[in-house]
Image (cartoon, rainbow, N blue to C red):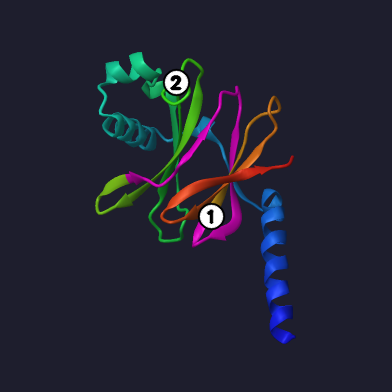
Amino acid sequence: MKRLLVVLVLIFSFFTSNISLANDLYKELDFTKSNKAAEKILYNYVLKDFEWTEKEAKDLARITPDAVSAIWLDLNGDSIPEIIGAVWSSACFGTAVGFHLYVLQKLDGKYEDISMVGFHSYPEFNVKILKHRTRGYYDIQVYESEIAPKRNVATFRNGLYYQLDYLKK
């Protein structure tokens, strides 16, 4: 009976902690205060990742240095800040423009993307870092404007950030 009670408490805690994620704000990111050094690293990462020249990036996906916003933030408490950035492009969205949320982590002296998060075309969005952590990394919430009020949370598992189902407003 005691074991059953412990299991029920753990299950209840899991579900209630996931429901409350949207209100558990640690830090709201302001991409209007983007860091130029972080932007440059992210832009160069994207070019290398797609194996594109600057001209190809611009012509094929509308990616230019102006399409990149990035900031530094330590997401896992190791005192080495990750780069969190948004790259606006048509690379994954055909003729429409959307953005991919990159989380670059420095591993063995080079940056690697640890995010699998992309979003559709909306004129505004905001990114919040939540107090809740998954496997030592802060969860990330993206709110996709009033036009399509979706709050999507990305959690860290299996070495990458993955987005969960949308949370209600």
Q: Label 2, on which residue?
A: 90
Residue 121 lies in what quarter of the image?
top right
Residue 129 shown in magenta: yes
| Image height of 94 relative to 156, above or below | above
Q: Amino acid at mark 2?
A: Ser
Residue 62 location (% of width, % of height)? 40, 17
What's the distance in space between the residues labelled 1 and 2, CA to CA?
Answer: 28 Å
Q: Residue at x 43, y 56 (%)?
A: 158
The x, y position of residue 129, in whole percent, is 57, 48
Q: Which mark is residue 138?
A: 1
Percent x, y of residue 61: 39, 19
**In this picture, residue 135 sits left or right of residue 62:** right
Whether residue 101 sits left or right of residue 12 in the image: it is left
Indicate the secondary structure of the residue bearing disc 1.
Answer: strand
Q: Is residue 12 above or below residue 65?
A: below
Residue 72 position by quadrant:
top left
* Left or right of residue 60, residue 18 in this image: right
Q: CB under 8 Å between callouts 1 and 2?
A: no
Residue 22 belongs to magenta span = no
The numbered dot on residue 146 is none
Q: Residue at x 66, y 63 (%)?
A: 14
